[in-house]
Image: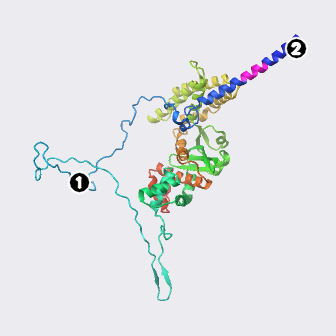
Amino acid sequence: MLASLVASLRAELAESQAALAEAREQIAELEARLRQTPRNSSRPPSSEGLQKPPPRSLRKKAGRRPGGQDGHAGTTLAQVAQPDREVRHEPACCGRCGAGLGGRPVTGVERRQVFDLPEVTVKVIEHQLIERECGCGQRTKGAPPEDAEAPVQYGPRIAAIIVYLYAGQFLSKKRTAQALAELFGIPLSSGTVAGITARAAGRLGGFLEHARERIAASQVAGFDETGFRVEGRLHWVHCARTRKYTLLTVHPKRGTEAMKAMGVLPSFAGVAVHDAWAPYDTYTAPDHQLCCAHAQRELQAVTDAAPQGQWCWATQAAGALTAMQALASEAIRQDRDAVDPAALAAQIRLYRSAALAGASQTAARSGALMKKHNALARRLLNRQDDYLRFTRDWRIPPDNNGSERDIRMIKLRQKVSGCLRTLTGARQFCAIRSYLSTAAKHGLSFFGALVMLTENRPWIPSAA
């Protein structure tokens, strides 16, 4: 009887201990989620809301003062030599004795210039298609210009402003129409904004194919993806980019199906810069540079979860990554062909020893959090060449920040004006953003590029 009671109590104790261990793992995982910030995860800064703490960057102090650095070309309002209009302001009388100053000599002129816009009015140009009758009885009418296809329509500059406000500055269709009405006195409906945007996007087929071909043929390209609400459901905007080109597409899927539809990675054979998301690795033709900034955030999350005051392998690994980026930047600045071999080898030893320690400490893989930390440590070891490729080839950036900058505008659009109601509208928006981003990389203004587009002569870099 006593033996069976002891056995029963032991079984209950074992169950309680197992339940306690499971609860501790769940608590640790929940605490890790609560500690997630944009600094140690892929969460966007906007996710912290109005109560977010003061920003802290993973970048280390460079010893430079805040603001513009020496030699930086600043921009400021400056007086012009020939103003459009001059207005003279004469003194009424002497400031000491009160005597009149009419006819007295001028001893100085202080110039103050005010920059402003004249009142903006819309010009209406009437195109009269003259019809004449020939002696043979045939009547022939003059042909209209391309920008006068209907009895009444908006011209290319007004159309460019509409697309600029809607796709370039992320106003909603309703607010775009309101802006045109208040600024220029132009009555406009949301449907007109949608129609003009659709026509502009429809003229970008040649540009999009050109951008796709140039990115696919490039030596180095960045790739990223982000969620986007379309038709009330989660879709994905995919980005492929170089220093001179941007291509954005939207697709219901996030993985290889969307990458194949985009048409860049299947034929790309350069160096693909991206985060460690597995579908990118299914493409074996290109070499890969994994984003060190993503790894730094993951390592920071491990450091944040470690006990205070104890050595943490993630802190050492992050420090080594930062040091190697600094070595590469210094070598590029000094126009050297390679990083100092001894300094690089020392940092690689620190990197590997930290990752090995992390893999060993988390080898038990007990709980979701430990599994995640173990996967990170093993990835740092197994993909070392892909994380450190930037130390051997100056063409390759150590991070994917360029892609994140190019794709960030999608998040800003969603934040300012909400989701897009149709997949067709989302594709049009991505096409126009691809066009504008590429134009900006070539030094062309948004508005100038859009005027060319609405005049039905879209700008293409090879023809620029």
Taking depth in this image into account, of 360 and 428 the one nearest to the observer is: 428
Taking depth in this image into account, of 272 and 376 the one nearest to the observer is: 376
- Give the percent coordinates (x, y) of residue 128: 44, 75
Residue closest to the far front: 98
Q: Left of 200 or right of it: where is 21?
A: right
Residue closest to the far right: 1
Please give the residue where the numbered disc 2 appears in the rendered image: 4
Q: Left of 108 or right of it: where is 445?
A: right
- As drawn, 427 above or below 352: below
- Give the percent coordinates (x, y) of residue 156: 46, 62
- Give the percent coordinates (x, y) of residue 233: 65, 47
Q: Residue at x 42, y 28 (%)?
A: 63
The local secondary structure at tag 2 comes to: helix
Q: Is residue 263 visible?
A: no
Which of the 4 image quarters holds residue 120? bottom left
Taking depth in this image into account, of 46 and 432 the one nearest to the observer is: 46
Residue closest to the far top: 2
The local secondary structure at tag 1 comes to: loop
Main secondary structure of the magenta stretch: helix
Amino acid type, residue under disc 2 in the picture = Ser
- Give the percent coordinates (x, y) of residue 82: 26, 54
- As drawn, 318 above or below 132: above
Q: Are marks 2 and 1 in contact (CB under 8 Å)?
A: no
Gap between marks 2 and 1, in whole Å?
108 Å
Q: Is residue 116 visible?
A: yes
In magenta, the rendered stretch is 14-21
Of the numbered discs 2 and 1, the one sitting upstream in the chain is: 2
Amino acid type, residue under disc 1 in the picture = Val
Q: Number of callouts in the render?
A: 2
